[in-house]
Structure formats: structure tokens, C-alpha cells
Image (spheres, helix red, strand yellow):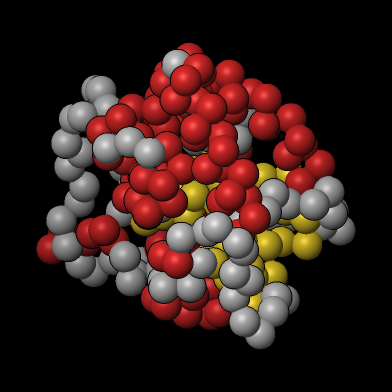
Amino acid sequence: MNAHDVIVYPTASSLQPFHSSQLRYRQASAGDATVLAQLIYAAGEAEFAYFLGADSQTCIAFLQEALEEPLGHFSWHHHQVATLADQPVAVMSIQDGRGSLLNGPYLAAQLTRHFGWRQTGAILRRGLVLQREIPSPARDQTLIAHCATVPEMRGLGVFSALFSHAMTCGQLPARKGQDIILDVLASNTQAFALYRRLGFVQMSTHPFVAAGVPEHLFAKRMRFRATPRSC
């Protein structure tokens, strides 16, 4: 399977009645990269289009390569998945703030291999702008990122089940005592409502608007403050 193959997900009718007990949970693997690249891109299309400055196929191809590697921000090693028939149907990246400084140089190398050094320079400059709005986690924080559920299973509590499992099994936070945080686009009211139900609260009363960041990428940072509830 390559980055451009069409992935066939379960149909809505085949999932009825559906219960979260049908799901299984595991760490992602390099073999999941094709599925996860398309899933993660679809959930963050605006951010990736701005950051990478490329069309969807190019963005997905880069994500697949990065997900296949054992190191780096996008590595499969950081991702947990919920599966149905062993196919990932939801994904969540867990980033330990104590290791975030190591991701930058590795990401730059990945970008250079895929896009060449000329394009990489422009990508990194856009990344610095985007980081003003969505900063890297501090050492005392665990960042949840790349949260996505296949379209056919949204609204069924799949991501909530994945998050709850990670909390119950001690995968969150990444280190004891760290705050759990995430970022959500200000325009994504549906995701914001989901995170509120899971127990996250906005860290400020207004979205932080950083200089130079396009309006459609304005984001809210949220912090976990309560016991998660199912949707």
C-alpha cells in the first residue's frame, strides 16, 4: 500500500450496533504509516497545507515517510491507536515535553531529504511562525497531538475511548506530574466541545493570536483538569 491508495473503512451500517468494547488499543507501528498519514492529514489539513506549502498528496507522502521512522515528532513511536479488526480507526500522538528539543533537528533532516534544502528553508520559517501560535510543550507538559478518527466512526465515542484507555493504562501523562495539554483551532468548535467533555479547559479566556499567523490557524490551548467522560 502506498500513500495514494484509497483506504476502505468500515461502513456505518456494518458498525451498528457499535460499542467501544469492540475496539482494541495498541502502540502504532511503522506498518500503520499509510493509514495514519492520510488520517492525520485529514484532521489537520489547514495546518499541514500552511506548514509544508504543498498539495495534499505531497503532504501525505511526507507524513507517511516521517511516521515510518523510529525517531522524530511524527514517528510511529509516539502514536497510540484504537483499532477495529486490527485496522487503526483513531489515533493520538503523545509528546513528552522533556524530549521536544530533540525533534527540531531531526524534523529538519526529514524535510531536507523529502523537499530539498531550498524548500526546507521556507518550511522551517513557516514553522517558526506557526510555533508562535502553537508552541512546543514545556518540560513539565505532555502534549496530545495528531488527534483523529476515521470519518465513518466520528460521533461514536471512539476517540474518547482511546483517550480514556491511555489515561487508565498510564500512558498519559508521558511522565508523572506533567500537565496534559492540547491545541485546537479556534474555528473547530466540534473538536473543542469534545475536548471539553473529556475534561479539558481552555488555558486563557481568549485565543492567543500570534503575530504573522494566518487567521484560519488561530488556536486555543487546553489543559486537562477533570476525569474523562465518554461521549
Q: Name the foreground residue: 11 vs 54.
A: 54
List x then y, in percent, for residue 112: 51, 18
The reply, left or right, for residue 55 in relation to residue 165 is left
List x then y, in percent, for residue 73: 60, 35
| Quarter of the rendering containing residue 109 | top right
Q: Name the foreground residue: 208 vs 88.
A: 208
Q: Name the foreground residue: 137 vs 67.
A: 137
Q: Name the foreground residue: 38 vs 173.
A: 38
Asked if residue 169 shows in the view, the reply is no
List x then y, in percent, for residue 46: 37, 54
Quarter of the image containing the N terminus?
top left
- The structure residue drawn at horizontal position 26% and vertical position 58%, both measured from the top left corner, is 151
Asked if residue 45 shows in the view, the reply is yes
Quarter of the image containing the C terminus?
bottom left
- The structure residue drawn at horizontal position 34% and vertical position 69%, both measured from the top left corner, is 156
The reply, left or right, for residue 98 in relation to residue 131 is right
